Amino acid sequence: MTNDMNIPFESKEELEEIRKTLVKEQRELKRKKFLKNKMSVAGLCIVIIMIIIAIFAPSIATHDPYETNVMESLLPPSAQHWFGTDKIGRDVFSRVIYGARISLFVGVSVGGISAVLGLIIGLYASTNKVLDNILMRCCDGLRSIPNLLLAITLMTVLGAALKNVIISLAIVSTPGVARMARSSALVVREQTYVEAMRCLGAKKSRILWKHIAPNILAPVIVQMTFAFASAIIAEASLSFLGAGVPSGTPSWGSMLSEGKAVIYSAWWMIAFPGAFTALTVLGLNLFGDGLRDLLDPLTN
Amino acid sequence: MRKFWKRLVPVLVTAAMVMTGCGGGSSAPAATTGSTGSDAATAATAAAVSYRDTINIAVQQEAPSLDLHKNSSLVARTMCRGTVWEQLVTLNGSGEAVPELCESVETNADSSEFIFHLRKGVLFHDGSEMTSADVVASMNRWIEGFSTAKSLAGDARFEAVDDYTCKITLANPCVTFLSVIAGSAQPAAITTEEACANEDENGFLKEYIGTGPYKFVEWELNQYILLEKFADYVPYGDPDAEMDGWAGYKHAYTEKLYFWYVQDATTRAAGLQTGQYDCIEGVSSDNYDMVANTDGIKIEQYQGGTVALVFNKKEGVASNEYFRQAVNAATDCEQLLRAVYGNFYDLGSCYMDDAQAFWVTDAGAENYNKRDVAKAKELLEKAGYNGETFRILTSNGAAAQQGMLVWQEQLKEAGINSELLIFDWATFTQYRTDPSAFDVYYTSFASVPVPSLKLYFGPTYPGWSADETLQKYVTTFNTSATLDEAKASWETLQGYSWEYLPLINVGHYLSTMGYQDYVEGLNFYSGMYYWNARIPE
Amino acid sequence: MKKYIVNRILSVIPVLIIVSIVVFSLLHLTPGDPAIAILGEDATQEAIDELRERMGLNDPIPVQYLNWLNDIFHGDFGTSTASSGEAVTSMIASHFIPTLQLAIYSTIVTVLLAVPLGMLAARKRGTVVDHGVTVLALCGISLPSFLFGLGMMMLFAVKLRWVPVSGYKAMSAGLGAHFRTMIIPAVSLGFMHSAFMMRMTRASMLEVLNSDYIKMAKSKGVKELWLVAKHALRNSLVTLVTVIGQGFIGALSGATIVESMFGIPGMGSLVVNSIGRRDFQVIQAVVLLIAVINVVMNLVIDILYGIVDPRIRLS
Amino acid sequence: MSKEEILEVKNLSTTFRTERGDLKAIDGVSFEVYKGEILGVVGESGCGKSVTSQSILRLYDEKYTAKYDGEILLDGKNIFDIPLKKMQEIRGAKISMVFQDALSSLNPVLKIGDQIMEPLRIHQKLGKKEARERTLEMLRLVGIPAPDKRIDQYPHELSGGMRQRVMIAIALACRPQLLIADEPTTALDVTIQAQIMDLIVDLNKKLDMGVILITHDLAVVAETCSRVVVMYLGQIVEEADVNDIFDNPKHPYTLGLIKSIPRLDGDPNERLYMIKGTVPLLNQIPNGCRFAPRCPYATDKCRTNMPELKAVSPTQKVRCWMVEE
């Protein structure tokens, strides 16, 4: 029995059923593909563990991270202090745990801000020539100044505080995201369906936000995970050069820079924060890779 | 196809050489490549023994400039005072001013006029002979640039009497004027008249010409400063006797002094351990045990200066005397010093260091380091303190921040809640000048020969110690006619100061120097000096 | 091609103007009076005011900016307040050489490490070698550079004492001494960048190895080794040129951490120290120079791109 | 035309190791190729035509992805017994291949002259100058105008047809006994297609070499091939002389293929015939005759057991139960 369209399939229901299985199959494939990629799963687990540590820090930590006790300065790891103590007797284990909260907070906010700002700048830059020129030249200008030097100068201007670190690192990483968002927005603009929308008389902003933005969301999200990872490293580098978070705040970066001074007598002050920093960044990179293969196969 | 490989192979070979190029290095210390040729044996003592011609010294900061008249950087003056430039008078072992470039000094009865009889035949590095014209030009340039000298001298300036004599007449008597010339933070370096006039665009000396045993050769910014032996240096004092403080015979056994700028303490300590450097300035307590228990390395410590928490007495919560006493009662100086300096500190209520033995007194010691939380709380009631934030200003050095964290906790126990303002050094020095910005700032002051050089007694100096009684004692001290009179007024001043508390004198920090045991003749009087330093072959 | 190069160079000007405005305004917003930072707290107020006047700090910021700009047009980048009033240009020249040397050595290390390993991982896709290289690359990316540098210093300089701990010896001080001071910083910096390049090489190699022209070459009887060395490498070189170029630019302008840790008087550590000293003239000049280098290097990469890939040459 | 045999494929099957387990792309394929003959291999895409051709040259990566069974006899020797390293002497010398899209099959960064020279220098160890001469000669042979200008150009500077000719020049540089052409004209438009096919037929005559022509275009087969093999889902379902295939196709699949060729003289408003359904995936191979689910004449017997490829006449073999009754 062939219906009028001479489509070999029997009936509407079967067509509908096949379409449903296709969509299910496709999602199944995507999930399997992500799971198959063992590395990105490992990355996801690491990131989740860190998030859990950050959220439940008060209950996990054994001591108050801010409480100093100069008599117990630089004790090696022991039953009482699992990761030993730092120069003024603070428990390194609790500080590493609370450090997760600070470092993830820095990473999330820098990643978030630069993604949102970058998306907006990229989108509007792709709309008209003049705006594009101005915005892109500014981005090029900011990008050609070495990230670390720009961050240090910003920190000196703003003074040592956590919010200033976030502002500086966000300013440093936004141009990168903006450039990437702009180039993918330009690609999407040329697509036929955007052309079609324009012919249907859709308003400019509607096209921008309803059609172009969702399609460049994938690369921006991927870029966000990498901005997240590099923000954690940048915060550590800033503290290393003495321009980072004040040493009261238990961030991994400041603990590493304090540990550097005592590397001979107290290896544990560098080992544990270093391990946690590297592990988190490794997790983020793995997760980012997996995400990119999934969301945005064409760019890998 | 073959040619591709022909091109690739040489690239690989050179790369491999680069990678393993370092393998061949012998494990012997690389930096002190000593030339075996012995230099001409200096006059009397060292006839037989020949010495290595280079000493490598690692210093912790880079001097902003070597123009000593115009900047008080510690590293610049320890490098050059007495080495490149000499002074009219210098400090002996007990902190008294003794002649260096002058034969003798005539002081009138009430120590308001000083006549300097210069030594003859003393040569500058550019070969010209030192005359009173050079001394007058240098000393007046020094007064213009140095705040304490200017406040003591007022409008009085040096003037030449004849070719080898010059004098200065002060408005009012000042018995400590000679000590100020001898040991001030901005050394009274004697250079030629032409050099004083020859300034660069920013007003700094273009050439560094002095009368010292070493002349300035080269400054590779961010790397090293090189001083070389000045062949026709005219020494003074007895060649066989040990030097008394900074005064005495300077043999200058070593040809070249390399001052390497190594900012990071750990790297400096590692450099000393591997023999790359012969001496290092600034061993931190963190890597003390790494350096100390390596054989062949010696450590020298002396009181480098005092650590102070200076209150803002002009505005804010700290302008109330009871509040300051409450803070003093809440402070445990030992814990604070340990947090910052590890075990490189000395407790002591005296504002002056051991090196200035004459001025050491324990007046006011009863208020020093007597932590009593109950008494602190009582004083807080008297001060009418009801929880305002006590703003603590500090620089962003890791040690300073850690010290302040410990202090914050001590204050919290006494019921004072505080907030930390952390900036880099340049911003810190500017913030300190604004009375509305802070309540107390934490800093350390290098040791000074006379109490009048204690800047925090100045009414306009940040902290604004403008209290009449305090200023009364300061002026009586400055204008005392004899040294004993000055000592007595200094004791009353320090006693009252521990009452009025313009600052909390937390204690003394120990400057620590590390050097290889084969280095002989180092001078450790309030600094590490290399006038007689030598490394036998 | 000529027109392409000319307008690329012209595009430098707007970037430089923006960079100069950003840096100039940022620096002059920095609290901390340069005069006090240089003279110290013992100086008299007159000396401080005189220095401020000489440095032109008292006139309004826009005026200072314009003075600075027309100084630059006359080739005068001002004098640094540090050392004996050395002209900024000669100071930068002496600091540029170590940075350039470090950048070249580290890029060589990066290429020698990343390209062979990347190609190997692509050839042996899916095997333990491939996973090994991927893990190595990820560790390289995740490890903060100073941690890695610190580890290298501890191992080679302190424990094994093969190389001096810190300090820089110029080429003139003997090739051996020079390389001994540069080898560990170069390897630390090189390894960091090679992590990223390893993955890029592997990705581009995979793409090339699965292409039709490799299948064709194989069907022509080309030997295994030649397949990779001649056909595959030439094609993946196209993407590698950009990655190596970016790596070089990164090393040139971003080695601040390695420089300050190993005591290499490069431009990175010069700027960090100058920020501490509020030596504005030096900072502004260095950042401008780095911006110019960035733009010029990007142009060089694009031109190289054309040389390596004939398809681009025509456009 | 002497009936001397160049290549005999006996019961060849190639299995690929994929994420979804081992898939047998071609299962028990056997056929021969004779000197001077053009053998057509037809079938829908995905029926294993290309896999067969590339298995002959063992182009797949035998370490990780592919496994070969059966025999391929070349001059009496089994290709699978030759160590992989030695295979290099056969590829390009005795058997060579031409692919569908010349733009992606020619190395974009090498001059076409160098790419043509390469097999000459590998197999015949010619010097640079001599190899260049032979290349110019080859370019003329495949009909490329102004060869001395073209030799130093890059693939992207040539037109589609020209690139295809260069590829053929590369394949025939060493005068191979057998040329495998894997859909050589599919990517070209019709006029160029005809020129290329004429070139192949002409060279086949001139160099007296065997050609395996893989295509899904029955019109091309009808004009150029002497014998045809029809493949479906990794198996040969029919093999016969070209006129037998078109005059009396035995297998329903061959019949379906021929009926779906649009005819010039056909009735304009009549619907084009289509074979029902699509080629199943390799992991859903039905038991019994593989064409059964799509075969209008399928019986229960067809759906349960697999027919053999039986000779129904000296020149024709069919794999179908219907033929047997």
Image: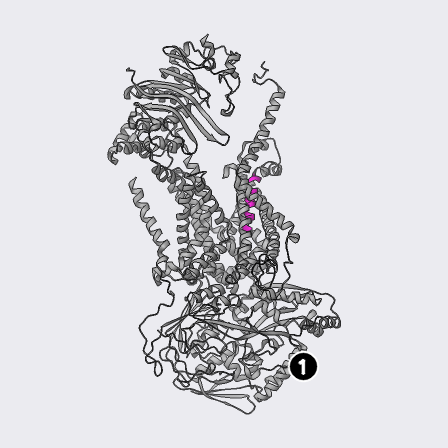
> Residue B519 at what x, y percent from top left?
41, 74
Q: Nearer the viewer, residue D240 or D159?
A: D240
Which chain contains the residue that carries disc 1?
A: B
Residue C268's place in the image compared with B533, above or below, is above
Q: Is residue B197 magenta?
A: no
Question: Overall secondary structure of the magenta stretch?
Answer: helix
What secondary structure is marked by label 1? helix
**Quarter placement of the N terminus of chain A:** top right
Disc 1 marks which residue? B469
- Horizontal and vertical percent position of residue A159: 59, 60
Residue D178 point in image, percent of width and height: 32, 23
Image position of C281 with respect to D192: above or below: below
Is residue A224 on the magenta stretch?
A: yes
Looking at the rendered structure, the kind of residue marked 1 is: Thr
Colouring of the image: one colour
Residue ID at (41%, 44%)? C117
In this view, the residue in front, D64 or A286, is: D64
Query: Which residue is more in the foreground, C156 or B477?
Result: C156
Residue density around tag 1, few if under 14, some if 14–19, many if 20 or more, within 10 Å = few
Location of residue A160 in the rendering, given as x and y in whole percent from the top left corner:
59, 60
Of B9 and A213, nearer the camera is B9
Q: What are the residue bounds of the magenta stretch? A: A216-231
